[in-house]
Amino acid sequence: MSSEHLHIELENIHVHIPEERTGMQRLLLRGPEYGQHVLRGVDLEIEAVPGTYTAIEGPSGSGKTTLLTTILGGLPGNQDRPTEGRVLWDGFDIYDMKPVERSEALRRVGFIPQTFLPMRGLTIAERVTLPYRLESRYERRAANKTTNKKVADVLDEVGLEKLPTSSNANLSNGEMRRMAFASALLGSEVEMLLADEPTAGLNGSSKDGINNLMSRLNDEGMPMVFITHEQHQAKTTVDIQDGRVVGRHDTPVRGKYSDSAEDSGVAS
């Protein structure tokens, strides 16, 4: 199901939060009240072409996080799916995929959650690699051949190269966010980064540091889509209000890759 560039298309997506939700649903679909119609007919296309740098902007409660969760296939085991519409990854609905197929598809995207929790007793390198060490033994053996070098590379990429053996529990909020980027970049098949409010809760210098990191990764060729409730100097901005995409505009941004509307990698 692979193509030259990952292409994700949302077709007429409606998401209505049921009256009752499980604990995991409350965690992943934070914000909306029970019974709320969170997404209303969203059409959106994202392609992982070099230079894609897209902000999905909207106020709190507008449906941004639900949109991102929906793109990523909702909850495991098809427990949650759009009330209406399709989410196509290279033409295949992610909600119709078998678990193995979905797992393979999701490896093509690195996800940066808004909260990347520290874990007592782990070094930064161990925390960054934890999601990969939890994979099956066969996959873990294959990954271990290049893991040590890759970890050093991604920690250097995000500015944590001097701290691999330090405790992950002693980091600042900005360093924790950098650690989340390192973990997302570690996957060998990652073609694009999706980030949930990557600068939320950060102070001025830490926020500037993450914005600079994102811009640099993008200028080096990593496509990026992130949600935010703040104004951001992205190449493409998709505005969402009350669960609907209400606008999209492109901003000229100087960089290595084309930033024209036709090359921006996003359509709505």
Image (cartoon, helix red, strand yellow):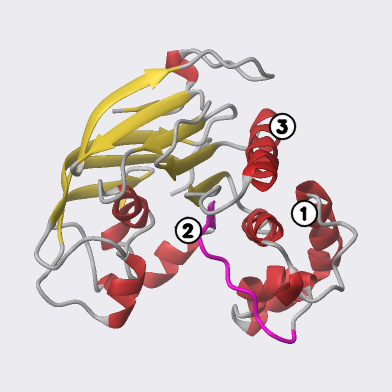
Of the residues shown, which amino acid type is indicated by label 1?
Val
Q: Is residue 81 left or right of residue 192?
A: left
Count how many numbered circles sit on residues in the image. 3
Residue named by callout 3: 220
Amino acid at dot 3: Glu
What is the magenta segment's predominant secondary structure? loop
Q: Nearer the viewer, mark 2 or mark 1?
A: 1
Percent position of residue 178, x then y: 69, 55
How packed is label 2: few (under 14 Cα within 10 Å), some, or many (20 or more)?
some
Q: Disc 2 marks which residue?
A: 106
Residue occupying the point 47% across, 22% down: 264
Query: Helix or strand or loop: what does disc 1 sit on?
Result: helix
Q: Reply yes or no: does residue 145 show up in magenta.
A: no
The earlier-in-sequence mark between 3 and 1 is 1
Dividing the picture into quarters, in which one does residue 246 lie? top left
Question: Split into 4 quadrants, where in the image is the C terminus?
Answer: top left
Magenta segment, which residues? 109-121
Percent x, y of residue 86: 21, 49
SS at circle 3: loop
Q: Position of residue 183 (x, y in %)?
A: 66, 61
Label 2 vs label 3, nearer the camera = 3
Q: Nearer the N terminus, badge 2 or badge 1?
A: 2
Residue drawn at (81%, 64%) of the image: 146
137 in relation to 180, above or below: below
The circle on residue 167 is none
The residue at the far bottom in this view is: 121
Disc 3 crowd rating (10 Å Cα; few below 14, some 14-19, many 20+) is some
**Residue under numbered circle 1:** 154
- Classify residue 131 as left or right of residue 157: left
- Tell me the kind of residue under disc 2: Leu
